[in-house]
Image: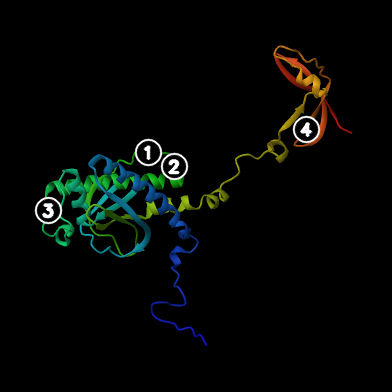
Amino acid sequence: MNTIKQTKSSPLHQVLDPCLLGRPVHLLHTFTLHLRDDLSALFANINRRYKAAFKVGDVTLTRMDKPEGSERWVAYRASQGQIAFSLERKVLLSVLDYRYGRRIDATPAAQSGDAVRITATEERLAVSLGMQLAETLAARVDAWEGAAAQPHDFTSATTSPPRKGAWTVCVVLEDTSIGMQGKLWFTLDEAWMARLLRGLAPARDKLNKPLANTQPLAARLQVTLTGHLMSKEMLLGELLDVRVGDVIPISLGRTDVLLDDSRLFTAAVAEHQGKLCLTSFEDVE
């Protein structure tokens, strides 16, 4: 007889956050899939330029505490809000080594960066790399919300770690040449997160907007009419005898007007300014 046991690692219920009720957070994974493609394209350019071997892994967006391994945070501020950025130092050192043509050994000490002194060049690279990544994230939010592409004029400044429960994008990045794997993080403030959530539920937003066109349905509904101009029966032998330059005589009388396959009207064919037109419509009895 099988029995079901409840353990601490597998609770039978989930505690709901009342702040998230009615918000489309269940669709965030679709956003992160597109963001992963954007980041992969960015690092593919870095790979081509510096002959690097970076590969973007999992990308997640959740509310979390301060990420482990993150030390230095840079805030990128613009009129749209703030995006903060941090990354593990071993990731930054790997980018730095590719950029300046030197490689570190694939040892735990070298990968962690513990034996490498912090330099001004490293700090400048952290800010510029974070700027590129923040622009990529911002562009994806813009596209998701349906906004036109625009420069965000980010300004950067060192900032404190994010508050507990901040919306955080976690990106796993691997340097396949030395087997190094590290992480980088973004945090979105309330303004950026609100824009993203609006973009995840465009249909809901449209329900709250007034209809722009208030004309009757009959005035707005478009249908396609087909004019059956002519048909001519020929013997197969006559058709096989036709040569280039031959003329097949036809005469245009009243034509059938069809809606899909339904015959609705008959109409006369007239010529106007070099175009054939239908006129004198009559209902089909």
User: Which residue is the site of mark 1?
Assistant: 150
Looking at the picture, how far across and down is residue 131, in whole percent? 27, 45
Q: CA distance from mark 1 to mark 4?
A: 48 Å
Q: Earlier in the sequence, mark 1 or mark 3?
A: 3
Q: Is residue 47 left or right of residue 103?
A: right
Closest to the camera, between mark 3 and mark 4, is 4
Q: CA distance from mark 3 to mark 4?
A: 78 Å
Give amino acid for label 4.
Answer: Leu
In contact (CB < 8 Å): disc 1 and disc 3: no
Give amino acid for label 2.
Answer: Ala
Q: Earlier in the sequence, mark 3 or mark 2?
A: 3
Q: Nearer the viewer, residue 210 or 239?
A: 239
Q: Earlier in the sequence, mark 3 or mark 4?
A: 3
Q: Is residue 96 left or right of residue 224?
A: left
User: Which residue is the site of mark 4?
Assistant: 258
Asked whether the viewer can see residue 55, the reply is yes
Looking at the picture, how far across and down is residue 149, in whole percent? 40, 39
Q: CA distance from mark 1 to mark 3?
A: 34 Å
User: Which residue is the site of mark 2?
Assistant: 147
In the image, residue 1 above or below residue 229:
below
User: Which residue is the site of mark 3?
Assistant: 118
Residue at image point 39% right, 80% down = 8
Looking at the rendered structure, the secondary structure element under dot 2 is loop
Q: CA distance from mark 3 to mark 2?
A: 40 Å
In contact (CB < 8 Å): disc 1 and disc 2: yes
Give amino acid for label 1.
Answer: Gln
Looking at the picture, how far across and down is residue 169, in whole percent? 34, 56
